[in-house]
Image (cartoon, grey):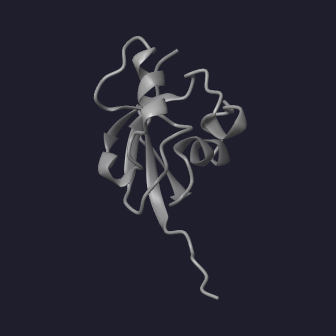
Amino acid sequence: MTSTTATKITLTVMPAGTAYEAESGITLLEALSRNGVMKHECDNGGKICLNLCHVSVLEGRKSLSKVQRTENERLDQIVGVGSKSRLACQAVLGEEAVTIELPTL
């Protein structure tokens, strides 16, 4: 039986520029929640999402999981999204550092 260990990566949150440690293989939302940055919980593992976990990926976009159809459809419903937009409940961290920007509320 082989064991897989998650790679530790750096997740930087702007505009503060604070860097956090995160594990590959978890969603951005889970990483942000574990570090006390974002408390929002999407129901059912993101299956019921209110689009409150919208973030902009400034660096490391290719390290995240690909945008799936359901996430793309949800992003289409949000005002102010751009090519760097992702839903933190849907984007799974890869093995490279990622820098995101949280929306201002």
Q: Quadrant of residue 43?
A: top right
Percent x, y of residue 96: 37, 60
Outermost residue toward the bottom in this view: 1
Quick one: 66 or 17, which is closer to the camera? 66
Outermost residue toward the front in this view: 69
Residue 13 as seen in the image, left or right of residue 31: left
Quick one: 65 or 11, which is closer to the camera? 65
Give the answer, above or below, for where 24 lies relative to 1: above
Residue found at x 55% / y 47%: 27
Residue found at x 38% / y 49%: 98
Percent x, y of residue 12: 43, 46
Quick one: 16 or 8, which is closer to the camera? 8
Residue found at x 66% / y 40%: 45
Q: Quadrant of residue 73?
A: top left
Quick one: 9 or 28, which is closer to the camera? 28
Percent x, y of residue 86: 42, 33
Residue 48 as seen in the image, left or right of residue 87: right
Give the answer, above or below, for where 76 lies relative to 10: above
Percent x, y of residue 11: 46, 50
Residue 59 as seen in the image, left or right of residue 92: left
Residue found at x 62% / y 35%: 46
Q: Where the N terminus falls, by quadrant?
A: bottom right
Q: How many marks?
A: 0
